Amino acid sequence: MKVLLLKDAKEDDCGQDPYIRELELYGLEATLIPVLSFEFLSLPSFSEKLSHPEDYGGLIFTSPRAVEAAELCLEKNNKTEDEEPEEQRVWNFPGPHNV
């Protein structure tokens, strides 16, 4: 029997998608169809805000994608920053907190 999996392929340690491997154990032939794509839409605006930490009292990440976006922006800002390292604006991260 054929099965459609509407997801991106992810390889595990065995070099195969775990869903495909598991379904094959039950005699099913799985086909992966990626249905979602992701694109950051507001990186320039976010980058501008991140470059002025003195304007904010904190930064709350609500998803792994938010962390990824911040990392992209901060890396870009560090590459284009003309100031000396000791004069660069920095965010103070006291540590992670869970809610």
Image (cartoon, rainbow, N blue to C red):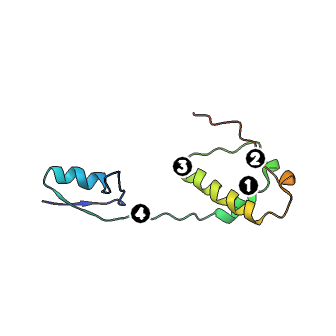
| Chain-order first, disc 2 or disc 3 | 3
Comes first in the chain, label 2 or label 1: 1
Q: Which residue is mark 2?
A: 91
Residue, x 54% and y 48% (percent of image)?
Answer: 63
Q: Residues within 10 Å of mark 4 (few under 14, many from 20)?
A: few
Q: Nearer the viewer, mark 4 or mark 2?
A: 2
Confirm or deny contact between disc 3 and disc 1 (CB under 8 A): no
Q: CA distance from mark 3 to mark 4?
A: 17 Å
Would residue 22 appear left or right of 43 to someone viewing this image? left
Q: CA distance from mark 4 to mark 2?
A: 33 Å
Secondary structure of the residue carrying tag 4 is: loop
Is 49 placed above or below 80 here?
Answer: above
Q: Between marks 4 and 1, how big is the CA–CA gap?
A: 28 Å
Question: How far apart in space, not on screen, are marks 2 and 3 (Cα)?
Answer: 18 Å
**Numbered label attached to residue 50:** 1
* Residue occupied by mark 3: 64
The amino acid pointed to by label 1 is Leu
**Circle nearer the N terminus (4, 2):** 4
Tag 4 and tag 2, C-beta contact below 8 Å: no
Q: Amino acid at mark 2?
A: Trp
Percent x, y of residue 28: 15, 56
Dots 2, 1 in contact, CB < 8 A: yes
